[in-house]
Amino acid sequence: MAERGHWGSKVGFILAASGSAVGLGNIWKFPYITGVNGGGAFVLIYLVCIALVGLPVMTAEILLGRATQTSPVGAFRKLSSSRSGWVAFGWLGVAGSFVILSYYSIVAGWALHYSYLSLTGQIVGLGPDGVGPAFDALFASNGLNLFWHFVFMALTVGVVIGGVSKGLERWARILMPALFVLMLILLVNSFTLDGFSRALDFVFGFHTEQLTAAGVLEALGHAFFTLSIGMGAMLTYGSYLHKKDDIMSAAITISVLDTVIALTASMVLFPIIFTYGMEPGAGPGLVFVSVPIAMSQMAGGTFVSFAFFALLVFAALSSSISMLEVITSYMIDEWKWLRSRATLVSAGIIAVIGIPSALSGGTRLFGDSFADVFGRNWFDTFDYLASNWILPLGGLGIALFTAWRVDDAIRHREFLEGTNLALFYKGWLFLLKYVVPVAISLVFLRAIGII
Ligand code: PHE
C-alpha cells in the first residue's frame, strides 16, 4: 500500500479533478465540434447530457474509486466477484486511456508549437490571411507533429512519475485560476467585436433543424470526454480521496466549472470567427486560427498569445496526466510495478501508438486506403471511436454496475460519507438506474441506424 498516495486536501482533489476535466476538450474541441454541428441545438443537447448523464456517472465513478481505493480493473473486481464479466469495463477504461492520450498528445503538441511561435513573435504578425495557411503547414508537417508529440509525452511522464499529490496539486492551484482569468480577458476583448451578437445567436440560439443523430451521439460522447468520465480517470482520482470528502458536491463543482469554461471558450472564439468572416465549421484548427487573429489586433498580443497557448498546454497536461494515471495505477496495483517503470513503459507505448495520428496531416503512414475505409484520417478515427463509442460504453457499464450490481448498503454508506447532499441519493440512483442506461442505449441504437 506504500505506493498509494492521497490528495493533500479536499481542494487538492477538486483542483486535480477539475484539471483533468478542463483541457483541450473545453477550449479546442468543444468550440470546433459546436461549429461543425451548427451551434445552438448541439449545445443544448450537450448541456442536457452533462446534467442528466455526465453528472450522475461522474459521481458514480468517484464513489467506486473511493470505496475500493484501487484502480478501475480492481474496483470492478472488488465490488463484484473475481470471475465476473464486469471487470471488462475496467479493461475498456485502460484501453481507452491508451487510445485517447495517443492523439490528445498531438493536439497538445500543436499548443506547444503555438507557444513557441508566440514567444518568437511569429503569431502576432500573421493577420487574417496568414492564420489558415500557418495552421495547415503545421498540420501537414510530419516532423513538427512527431517532435511536439514526443515532447508532450515526456512532459506528461515528468509529472506522473512524481506521484499523486506533490507537483501537480501545487501547480494546479496557480495555473488553473490563471487560465480562467486569461479567458475572461479574452472574453472582454471578443465582446467588443462586431461578430459578438452573431456568435451569441450561433452558440445559444436553438435551431432544431440542425440536429442529426450523429450530432446527438457526438454531444453525448463529448459530455463524457470533457468530464473525463467513462474510462476510469475520475475513478482513479477518486481512489486517492479521503473518506471525509463530499463526493456529490465535488462532482457538481467539477461539472459546473468545466461547462462554464467550455461555454466561455466558445464565446471567445466565435465572435472572432464571425467578425473576420471565417468558417465556424472549419474543424480542428479553429482555436489555432481564431486566437492568433485576435492577438494581432490586441495591445500586448505577443505576450497574451504566449500566455494563452502556454496555459492551454498546462490545461492539456493536467488532463493527460489523469489518462496516464489510469494505466500507471493499474500496473502499480495489479502488477506491483514501481511507479517509475509503469509510467515509462505506458508512456512509451502511447508515444508509439500516436505516430500514425501525428502523420495524419502529412504523408500518411498507411496510405489513403485507410482513410477511405473509415472516411476519416487516423487522428479523426481515434477521436471518433474513443469519445463517441468507448467513453459512453464505459459510462454505460459504470452506471449499470453501480446501480444494479453494487450492494446498496456499501453504495449508500459511501455516498453519505462526508456529504451534505444526502437528499440527492434517491434522485442520483434513479438517474443511474434508468435515465443514463436508456439515454445511452437510445443514442447508440439511433447512431447505428436501428431506430
Ligand atoms: N476531459 C479532458 C478534456 O476535456 C480529456 C480527458 C478525457 C481526460 C478522458 C481524461 C480522461 O480535455
Image (cartoon, grey):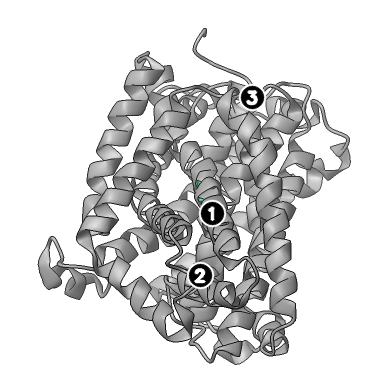
Q: Name the residue under label 2.
A: 287
Q: Residue at (32%, 35%) from the top-left corner?
A: 347
Q: Do the residues labelled 1 and 2 touch (CB within 8 Å)?
A: yes
x and y percentages locating residue 146 in the rendered image: 25, 52
- CA–CA distance in space, label 1 to label 2: 11 Å
Looking at numbered disc 1 in the image, what kind of residue is underneath it?
Answer: Leu
Q: On the image, numbered disc 3 is attached to which residue?
A: 67
Image position, residue 172 (x, y; %): 64, 38
Q: Can residue 12 be seen in this view?
A: yes
Q: In which quarter of the image is residue 285?
A: bottom left
Marked residue nearer the N-terminal end (1 or 2): 2
Crowd around label 3: few <14 · some 14–19 · many ≥20 (10 Å): many
Residue 121, above or below 346: below
Front residue of this view, candidates 439 and 13: 13
Question: On the picture, is 137 further left or further right than 391?
Answer: left
User: Residue 9, image x and y in percent?
Assistant: 73, 24
Q: How far apart are marks 2 and 3 (CA)?
A: 39 Å
Question: Amino acid under label 2?
Answer: Val
Image: 411 above or below 297:
above
Other-residue count near label 2 (Cα within 10 Å), few / some / many at <14 / 14–19 / ≥20: many
Q: Which of marks 2 and 3 is in front?
A: 2
Label 1 vs 3, first from the N-terminus = 3
Q: Mark 1 points at which residue?
A: 312
Q: Residues within 10 Å of mark 1 (few under 14, many from 20)?
A: many
Q: Which of marks 2 and 3 is nearer the N terminus?
A: 3
Query: Residue 49 appears in which quarter of the rendering?
Result: bottom right
Whether residue 248 is situated above or below residue 217 in the rendered picture: above
Instruction: Identify the residue shown where x is 50% and y is 70%.
Output: 287
Q: Residue 98 carries which label?
A: none
Horizontal arrangement in the rendering, residue 301 relative to residue 368 (left or right): right
